[in-house]
Image: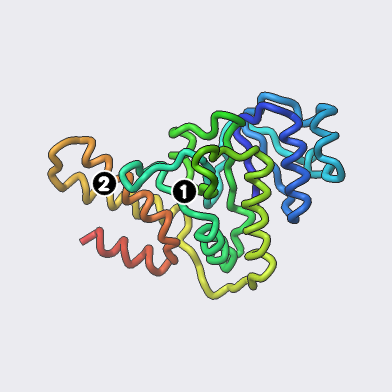
Amino acid sequence: MKIILVKPQKSGNVGAVARVMANFGFKELVLVNPKCKKTSLEAKKRAKHAQNILKKAKVVKHLPKLHTLIATTSQVGTDYNIPRSPISPEQLNKLVNKLSKTKSLSNIGLVFGPEGEGLSNEEISKCDFVLTIPTNKQYPVLNLSHSIAVVLYELSKVMSSTKVSEHIILASEADKKQLLKLVKKKLNKLQFATKSKKQTQLTVWKKLLSKSFLTKREAFALMGFFKK
């Protein structure tokens, strides 16, 4: 599983994240358009004995294309704010537990935004799920490394007790894209009062398909339905 930091501001926080990752057995760190250097003295000091994670951290310009991207935010929405409709750490555990049965953990990314600002709506829209950690409403924002520690602790409990199974095959990204094309085609045949309502329907379907963890067999069944 990849830990992805989007535009991290402080090298010390990057080092602290590497240390937390080592604490819970995670090794893949990705920095998207970082505003600091992972090689700085402060980063190395904060990383302690996780220098190897820091050294091997990949620096990229854009969010990597993975099977599942899970955004994190403290600014949650409601059912009407679809991009920010969140899942809890407990639901994340179930999600990862199901994904682990398909041997696709290496293709999952946990996405964390920059300190103080968090992820933008545009960045969140590129992810499949939004995760939030329940905190005190009077001061809901956690330090970057602290929030990652909470999430990785929860995940480590699931991953350490999960057995991999080859009996379940999830729908691929290509399957999902094909299914979404069929949904779009069907929506184009329907009449909506406004374009925004049509777009809302499309957004809902996109979220629904990603959250449902369709098996390949289920995806094919839905394709057959929408082709009628």
Report if residue 131 is visible in the image. Answer: yes
Question: Where is residue 163 shown, x and y percent of the image?
Answer: 64, 73
* Residue displayed at 51% across by 47% down: 132
Point 66% across, 53% down: residue: 152
Helix, strand or loop at disc 1?
loop
Are the two marked residues, 1 and 2, in contact with CB atoms closer than 8 angstroms?
A: no
How far across and down, in percent of the image, does residue 61 sit? Answer: 61, 30
Quadrant position of residue 6: top right
Q: Nearer the viewer, residue 13 or 219?
A: 13
Task: Please indicate, yes or no, whether residue 69 appears anywhere in the rendered image.
Answer: no
Reply above or below: 57 against 128.
above
Looking at marks 1 and 2 on the same chain, the residue that comes earlier in the sequence is marked by 1
Tell me which amino acid carries mark 1: Asp
In the rendered view, tell whether residue 84 sits above or below residue 97: above
Dot 1 crowding, Cα within 10 Å, few <14, some 14–19, many 20+: some
Would residue 87 be found to the left or right of residue 102 on screen?
Answer: left
Estimate the x, y position of residue 173 in percent, counting from the top left.
Answer: 47, 53
The residue tagged with tag 2: helix, strand or loop? helix
Residue at which label 1 appears: 128
Q: Is residue 137 left or right of residue 225?
A: right
In the picture, the disc for residue 89 is: none
Q: How is the image coloured?
A: rainbow
User: Circle 2 is placed at which residue position?
Assistant: 201
Q: How many numbered marks, from 0 up?
A: 2
Q: Residue furthest top?
A: 35
Residue density around tag 2, few if under 14, some if 14–19, many if 20 or more, within 10 Å: some
Which residue type does callout 2 highlight? Gln
Q: Who is closer to the viewer here, 6 or 136?
A: 136
Question: Residue at image x 63%, y 65%?
Answer: 158
Seen as rendered, the residue at the extreme front is: 138
Mark 1 to mark 2: distance in Å?
16 Å
Q: Quadrant of residue 34?
A: top right
